[in-house]
């Protein structure tokens, strides 16, 4: 599922396709949070992903995040400025509230 996207969702679609393929996700959300930041309308620079995969089984959180970052290296090197990651196993997801917290509003950088 891709949420909060403009008509130009090339980056979000790429993120979704890569994570779905490499992680064989059971549940996947790609949320474009760029609108919450000081970027041009329709930008694809800030994302949150919620990925649920058996491939996260027995991996500590840092390795789960590294796995996602490695899969999305091309996007991170070509315009994606921020990536928030929720990475869970199916069991963890089932035992959770399944509520994805909103990211905080942009403070304009440098703690302003």
Image: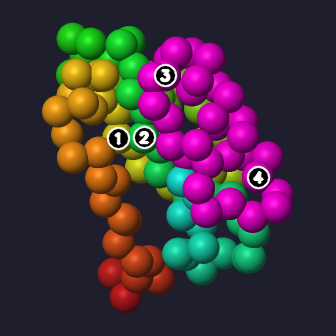
- In three-dimensional space, the C-alpha distance between marks 1 and 2, rounded to whole angstroms, equals 5 Å
Q: Residue furthest left?
A: 95
Q: Are marks 3 and 4 in contact (CB under 8 Å)?
A: no
Q: Which residues are magenta?
A: 1-30
Q: Residue 86: x percent and y percent?
A: 35, 41
Q: Given the current orientation, which residue lies at the most extreme bottom position? A: 112
Alpha carbon of mark 2 to alpha carbon of mark 3: how far? Answer: 10 Å
Residue to which mark 2 is pinned: 50
Q: Is residue 12 magenta?
A: yes
**Circles 1, 2 touching at the beta carbon (< 8 Å):** yes
Vertical order, 59 against 88 (above or below): above
User: Is 10 situated above or below 53?
Assistant: below
Query: Taking the image as drawn, is residue 77 in sight?
Result: no
Which sits in the foreground, 92 or 43? Answer: 92
Which of pointers 2 and 4 lies earlier in the amino acid sequence?
4
Which element type, helix, strand or loop, lies under badge 2?
strand
Q: Badge 3 local density, few (<14 within 10 Å), some, or many (20+)?
A: many
Residue at image coords 72%, 36%: 14
Q: Confirm whether the magenta stretch covers residue 26.
A: yes
Question: Which numbered marker is on residue 86?
Answer: 1
Q: Nearer the viewer, mark 1 or mark 3?
A: 3
Residue that label 3 marks: 25
Q: Under tag 1, what secondary structure? A: strand
Q: Is residue 62 above or below residue 105?
A: above
Task: Give the Cα separation between the discs numbered 4 and 1.
Answer: 21 Å
> In percent of the image, x 35 and y 72: which residue is there?
104
Dot 4 or dot 1: first in sequence order is: 4
| Residue 75 lies in quadrant | top right
Q: Position of residue 36 (x, y in %)?
A: 53, 75
Read off the residue under disc 4: 9
| Real-space CA distance between mark 3 and mark 4, rounded to the nearest whole angstrom | 20 Å
- Residue placed at 68% from the left, 46% from the top? 12
């Amino acid at each position: 599922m891709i949420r909060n996207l403009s008509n130009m969702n090339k980056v979000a679609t790429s993120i979704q396709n890569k994570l779905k393929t490499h992680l064989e996700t059971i549940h996947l959300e790609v949320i474009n949070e760029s609108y919450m930041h000081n970027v041009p309308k329709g930008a694809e620079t800030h994302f949150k992903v919620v990925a649920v995969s058996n491939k996260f089984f027995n991996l500590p959180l840092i390795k789960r995040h590294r796995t996602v970052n490695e899969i999305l290296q091309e996007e991170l090197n070509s315009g994606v400025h921020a990536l928030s990651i929720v990475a869970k196993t199916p069991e963890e997801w089932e035992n959770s509230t399944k509520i994805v917290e909103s990211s905080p509003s942009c403070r304009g950088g440098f703690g302003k």
